[in-house]
Image (cartoon, rainbow, N blue to C red):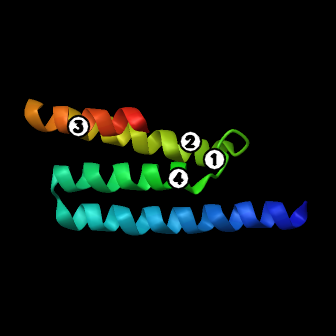
Amino acid sequence: MLHCANRQTNNFFYLRKILRITNKQIKYSSAKKTEIELRIYFCASIKKSGINMDFNIVLFNLYQQQIKKINQTLATLPEDLQYDYVAEIENL
């Protein structure tokens, strides 16, 4: 059991590090389209990884916060770009 808990902590550490680097790239880019694409890719990667978010509340909150940021940024884009990303966001 300790090995499993250690692995989850290790995964969470790497996810936080990846998110920190992603946020830096978003800041340097300052393009809303890039921000949405990077955040969607991050959330999709978490989902594909198979990490169970039902038992890890911190990871679940991290994921939900990214979805919230995607929706906030999406609201600032023009309608035609919003339509392009809606299908991708619904899959998350």
Mark closest to the chain's N terminus, 2 or 4:
4
Q: Can residue 1 be seen in this view?
A: yes
Q: Where is residue 60 in the image (x, y as percent from the top left)?
A: 59, 42
On the image, numbered disc 4 is attached to which residue?
Answer: 48
In whole angstroms, how far apart are the C-alphas of marks 4 and 1? 18 Å
Task: Check if mark 2's residue and mark 1's residue have beta carbons within 8 Å.
Answer: yes
Element type where label 1 sits in the image: helix
On the image, numbered disc 2 is attached to which residue?
Answer: 61
In the rendered view, tell whether residue 10 sits above or below residue 37: below
Is label 2 or label 4 in front?
4
Is label 4 or label 3 in front?
4
In whole angstroms, how far apart are the C-alphas of marks 4 and 3? 23 Å
Element type where label 3 sits in the image: helix
Q: What amino acid does circle 2 point to? A: Asn
Element type where label 2 sits in the image: helix
In the rendered view, tell whether residue 33 sits above or below residue 15: above
Task: Locate residue 62 relative to residue 44 in the image: left or right.
Answer: right
Q: What amino acid does circle 1 point to? A: Val
Looking at the image, how many numbered discs can be counted on the residues?
4
Q: Which residue is rendered at x = 15% and y = 56% of the image? A: 31
Q: Which residue is rendered at x = 42% and y = 55% of the image? A: 42
Is label 3 or label 1 in front?
3
From the viewer's side, name the closer residue of 91 and 56.
91
Task: Locate residue 55 relative to residue 88 in the image: left or right.
Answer: right
Mark closest to the chain's N terminus, 3 or 2:
2
On the image, numbered disc 3 is attached to which residue?
Answer: 74
Q: Where is residue 51 in the image (x, y as percent from the top left)?
A: 64, 52
Q: Where is residue 37 in the image (x, y as percent from the top left)?
A: 27, 52
Quarter of the picture holding the N terminus: bottom right
Element type where label 4 sits in the image: helix
Q: What amino acid does circle 3 point to? A: Leu
